[in-house]
């Protein structure tokens, strides 16, 4: 972006951006991009050392103010605690990036794991969008980005509850886009495909690479595409290969064929 576009972005979505799930992967890429346009940051994740290392890097590189909130977004009190910690700040942009995901059969996974997935991936983004969306709408400007996924578009065996929470974020963001764009708040669901992040690398088996899937994207490209789409549309699918794959799965395949195709691939790679 040009310096003029950066200034317009900072005016619309500044002065402070809150990134929930910020210390690595796509969240850290959002933090680096937003620091680059001069926004002050609030970074949330569980592990303080990773958070502090990123905060130090961004303060040194951009001269911005960075506050860190070490916190588990899967707990019932997380959203209130974050909102309270930010009361003295004007948060103009919320990026909800954190996710809990487990690749395993639904019934063989303890129910507590599914409950946790629901808490981190669905409850927390909704509660934070409610808490920070209100003041944004009052000011008449702001933005909310909810990280979704290609798994939002059809059921995916072995990540059934994770995929369902990503559909929740997609539909929540679309609904809020419809409600809030008239009040100056831009809302976006960012549907990423496979992206090279520590989380992705931890869960991806080296022995069975994807056969037909597009090449994984870099986290920086996902963040850049999402920030560019904010204020232009309610949903972005990042990466050209992902847009083509998603088109085929949604518009050419029946839902039944889409689920069966992705199910076969998931079973081959992970089961
Ligand atoms: N990577 C992919 O292939 C891919 C594909 C499609 C969609 N997505 C979506 O993109 C988003 C980011 O993915 P990613 O691969 O970058 O994730 P990641 O590498 O696993 O990083 C997630 C970030 O969130 C934090 N986090 C995780 N659980 C948390 C919790 N309970 N409380 C607070 N912070 C938490 C992590 O730090 P701590 O561990 O220190 O808490 C980390 O900073 C997710 O919403 C995911 O669903 C990713």
Image: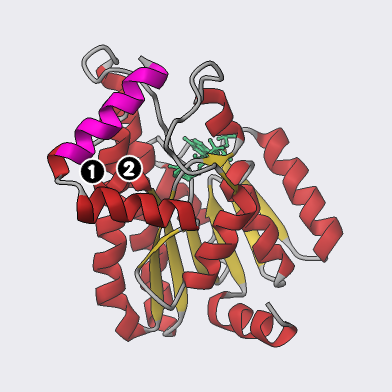
The answer to which quarter of the image holds residue 50 is top right
Q: Residue under circle 2?
A: 151
Kindly identify the residue that appears in the image at 39 percent across and 83 percent down.
Answer: 184
The image position of residue 173, as x and y in percent, is 31, 62
- Say if residue 87 shows up in the picture: no
122 vs 225, nearest the viewer:
225
For the C terminus, the quadrant is top left
- Magenta span includes 263: yes
The image position of residue 254, as x and y in percent, is 14, 46
Kindly identify the residue that appears in the image at 37 percent across and 49 percent down.
Answer: 245
Q: Indicate yes or no: mark 2 CB to ligand 1 under 8 Å.
A: yes
Q: What range of the chain is rendered magenta?
A: 257-270
Task: Kindly state the secondary structure of the residue where label 2 is placed.
Answer: helix
Above or below, comparing residue 258 to residue 128 in the picture? above
Q: CA distance from mark 2 to mark 1?
A: 6 Å
Q: Residue under circle 1?
A: 154
- Say if residue 233 shows up in the picture: yes
| Number of residues whose C-alpha sits closer than 10 Å to that of mark 2, classed few (under 14), some (14–19) or many (20 or more) | many
The image position of residue 65, as x and y in percent, is 74, 63
């Amino acid at each position: 972006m040009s310096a003029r576009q950066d200034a317009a972005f900072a005016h619309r979505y500044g002065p402070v951006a809150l990134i929930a799930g910020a210390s690595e992967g796509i969240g850290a890429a959002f933090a680096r991009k937003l620091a680059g346009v001069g926004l002050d940051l609030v970074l949330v994740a569980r592990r303080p050392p990773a958070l502090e290392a990123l905060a130090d890097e961004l303060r040194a590189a951009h001269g911005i103010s960075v506050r860190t909130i070490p916190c588990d977004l899967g707990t019932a009190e997380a959203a209130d605690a974050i909102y309270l910690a930010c009361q003295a700040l004007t948060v103009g942009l919320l990026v909800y990036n954190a996710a809990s995901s487990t690749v395993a059969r639904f019934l063989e996974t303890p129910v507590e794991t599914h409950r946790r997935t629901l808490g981190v991936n669905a409850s927390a983004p909704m509660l934070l969008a409610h808490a920070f969306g209100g003041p944004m709408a009052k000011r008449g400007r702001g933005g909310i980005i909810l990280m979704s996924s290609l798994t939002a578009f059809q059921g995916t065996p072995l990540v059934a509850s994770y995929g369902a929470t990503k559909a929740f974020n997609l539909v929540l963001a679309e609904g809020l886009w419809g409600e809030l764009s008239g009040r100056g708040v831009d809302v976006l669901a960012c549907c990423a495909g496979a992206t090279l992040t520590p989380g992705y690398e931890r869960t991806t088996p080296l022995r069975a690479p994807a056969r037909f899937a597009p090449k994984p994207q870099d986290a920086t490209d996902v963040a850049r595409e999402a920030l560019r789409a904010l204020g232009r549309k309610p949903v972005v699918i990042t990466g050209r290969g992902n847009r083509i794959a998603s088109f085929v799965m949604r518009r050419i395949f029946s839902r039944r064929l889409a689920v069966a195709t992705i199910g076969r691939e998931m079973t081959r790679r992970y089961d």
